[in-house]
């Protein structure tokens, strides 16, 4: 079984490939995201929100000091990276999503300054939700996410019917995958064959993006982690093979 994975070309992709191999799957690594740092760091505020491991690493490299701020991480991966660099983590929502964090902070941020430090493609759900709760929200773009040159091997494999599954790990991976298919002249064939494949999305926003582009999603893990996404997608593939 061949499953395409679209993580950035760093240890995240290496770990994803290793996990899929352990699950007896033939991984097709096809990075759909590349990170371009802006050199900025989070501003001082009453609450500071970090949404990714990459954001934490770049904030640390820029010399970020949270001071007395309440530090919030949108998921355990982000929280673990914060702790790795010596930052204290005050809040991690049980539901690892923008909506989950807004729900936790809604009754705490009225009249408070909230700094959201993330990529240039962050969801408005977080910033709008905090603003609606009465916070003075500022967003700092720590890095931009672009589509790497040469990506799209997985789209060609999908178009030929030589791929069994795809694992979308953000809304941008969906959009860049379809962009690569279009640029290679195989979008129609790719979309048709996706109906016969196992399609996984790491969380609700990614699922919604795929659905809005006409892609049926089979697997959305309750916990938004690549480990759960991969394991549930492989299980789904196994169940299909037994039918």
Image (tube, helix red, strand yellow):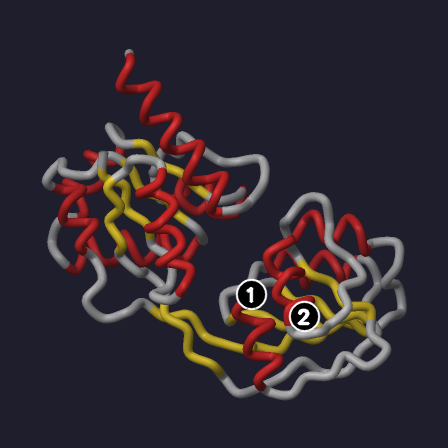
Which residue is most to the top?
A: 243
Q: Residue at x 62, y 78 (%)?
A: 140
From the viewer's perspective, is 10 left or right of 154?
right
Q: Secondary structure at mark 1?
A: helix
Q: Nearer the viewer, residue 176 or 242?
A: 242
- Number of residues whose C-alpha sits closer than 10 Å to that of mark 2, classed few (under 14), some (14–19) or many (20 or more): many
Q: Residue at x 89, y 69 (%)?
A: 111
Quadrant of the rendering where the N terminus is positioned: top left
Q: Position of residue 153 (x, y in %)?
A: 17, 54
From the viewer's perspective, is 72 left or right of 76?
right
User: How far apart in space, not on screen, are marks 1 and 2 (Cα)?
Assistant: 14 Å
Give the quadrant of residue 138: bottom right
Q: Where 53 sits versus 226, above or below?
A: below
Q: Position of residue 150 (x, y in %)?
A: 19, 67
Q: Residue at x 58, y 40 (%)?
A: 223
From the viewer's perspective, is 203 left or right of 99?
left
Residue topped by disc 1: 53
Q: Secondary structure at mark 2?
A: strand
Q: Residue at x 64, y 53 (%)?
A: 76
The label shown at residue 9 is: none
Which residue is most to the front?
A: 22
Mark 1 vs mark 2, foreground winner is: 1
Residue topped by disc 2: 116
Q: Position of residue 133 (x, y in %)?
A: 82, 58
- Number of residues whose C-alpha sits closer than 10 Å to that of mark 1, classed few (under 14), some (14–19) or many (20 or more): some
For marks 1 and 2 on the same chain, the one whose residue lies earlier in the sequence: 1
Quadrant of the rendering where the C terminus is positioned: top left
Q: Position of residue 51 (x, y in %)?
A: 61, 63
From the viewer's perspective, is 171 left or right of 224?
left
């Amino acid at each position: 079984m061949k499953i395409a994975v679209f993580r950035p070309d760093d240890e995240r992709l290496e770990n994803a490939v290793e996990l899929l191999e352990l699950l007896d799957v033939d991984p097709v690594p096809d990075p759909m995201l590349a990170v371009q740092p802006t050199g900025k760091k989070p501003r001082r505020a009453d609450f500071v929100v970090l949404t990714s491991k990459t954001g934490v690493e770049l904030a640390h490299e820029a010399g970020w000091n949270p001071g007395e701020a309440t530090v919030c991480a949108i998921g355990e991966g982000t929280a673990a990276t914060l702790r790795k660099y010596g930052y204290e983590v005050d809040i991690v929502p049980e539901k690892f999503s923008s909506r989950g964090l807004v729900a936790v902070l809604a009754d705490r941020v009225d009249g408070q300054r909230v700094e959201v430090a993330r990529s240039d493609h962050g969801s408005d759900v977080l910033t709008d939700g905090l603003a609606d709760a009465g916070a003075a929200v500022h967003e700092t773009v720590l890095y931009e996410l672009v589509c790497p040159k040469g990506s799209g091997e997985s789209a060609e494999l999908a178009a030929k019917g030589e791929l069994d599954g795809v694992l979308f790990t953000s809304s941008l991976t969906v959009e860049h995958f379809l962009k690569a298919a279009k640029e290679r002249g195989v979008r129609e064939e790719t979309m048709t064959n996706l109906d016969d494949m196992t399609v996984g999305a790491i969380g609700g926003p990614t699922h919604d993006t795929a659905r809005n582009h006409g892609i049926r999603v089979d697997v959305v893990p309750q916990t938004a982690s690549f480990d759960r996404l991969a394991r549930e997608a492989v299980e789904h593939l196994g169940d299909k093979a037994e039918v």
